[in-house]
Amino acid sequence: PLAEKGLDVLATLVGIFALLVVTVSYLGQRILKAERQRFDRLELLISSIGHDLRSPLQAIQNAGSLLSGALAADDRAKYSKVVLSSTVALARLTDDILAVVREEQVAIQIAPTDVRLWAEGFEAAYRHKVESKGLSWTMALRGTADQWVATDGERLRQCVGTLVANSVRYTDH
């Protein structure tokens, strides 16, 4: 009887140990999967940040190089606005990055936006980039009246700017 009890206790301990091994293995796999997903999200965030930083920096660089030449006062004012709007975009992107790091909600700022003014600013920021690759730039707005939309102008600039930047990057002719 004492030997049988010892075997029963040993069998129980082996069962508990096997259960513990399976549980630790399962938890390890779950932790590993969660960490891999976290890493994938971080990798995507870093890629997005790099992409979103590149566009306003290139606009500042292009406008700066154009400003360094002899320009008419109107052109100088236009490219100065590009530099200003691009630095505002960089500041907002920096705020967004800090919000993500702090696990806060990224703010969307919906406001009435003059479509024509937005498009002119966008063109001023991106036209040089497109044409410097030998591509042509065409932009046409329909209607003569002021057109306003409720949007986040900077987010819209980010999205459309990404499309233009990718188009320029991946177009050979």
Image: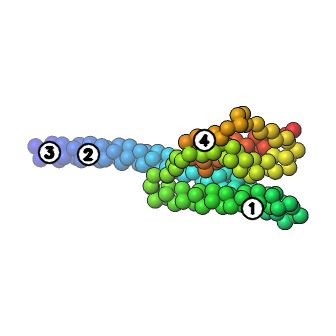
> Reading the chain from its start, which is encountered first: label 4 or label 3?
3
| Of callouts 2 and 3, the N-terminal one | 3
Labels 2, 4: front one? 4
Amino acid type of the residue tagged 3 in the rendering: Lys
Which one is closest to the eye, mark 2 or mark 3?
2
In this view, which residue lies farthest toward the left? Answer: 1
Viewer-proximal residue among 135 and 125: 125
Q: Which residue is mark 2?
A: 16
Residue tagged 3: 5
Asked if labels 1 and 3 touch by Cβ distance under 8 angstroms, the answer is no
Type of the residue with mark 2: Ile
Q: CA distance from mark 4 to mark 1?
A: 24 Å
Please indicate whether residue 53 sits to the left or right of residue 36 in the image: right
Please state if 18 lies on the left or on the right of 41 as rendered. Answer: left
Q: Which residue is mark 1?
A: 80
Answer left or right for 136 relative to 123.
right
Q: CA distance from mark 2 to mark 4?
A: 69 Å
- x and y percent of residue 7 in the render? 20, 44
Marks 4, 1: nearer the viewer: 4
Q: Quadrant of the C terminus?
A: top right
- Label 4, residues with CA under 10 Å away: few <14, some 14-19, many ≥20: some
| Closer mark to the observer between disc 3 and disc 1 | 1
Q: Which colour scheme appears in the figure?
A: rainbow
Q: Secondary structure at mark 2?
A: helix
Separation of disc 4 and disc 3 at Cα? Answer: 85 Å
Of the numbered discs 4 and 1, the one sitting upstream in the chain is: 1
CA distance for labels 1 and 2 = 72 Å
Q: Please, what is the three-letter code of the amino acid marked with disc 1?
A: Ser
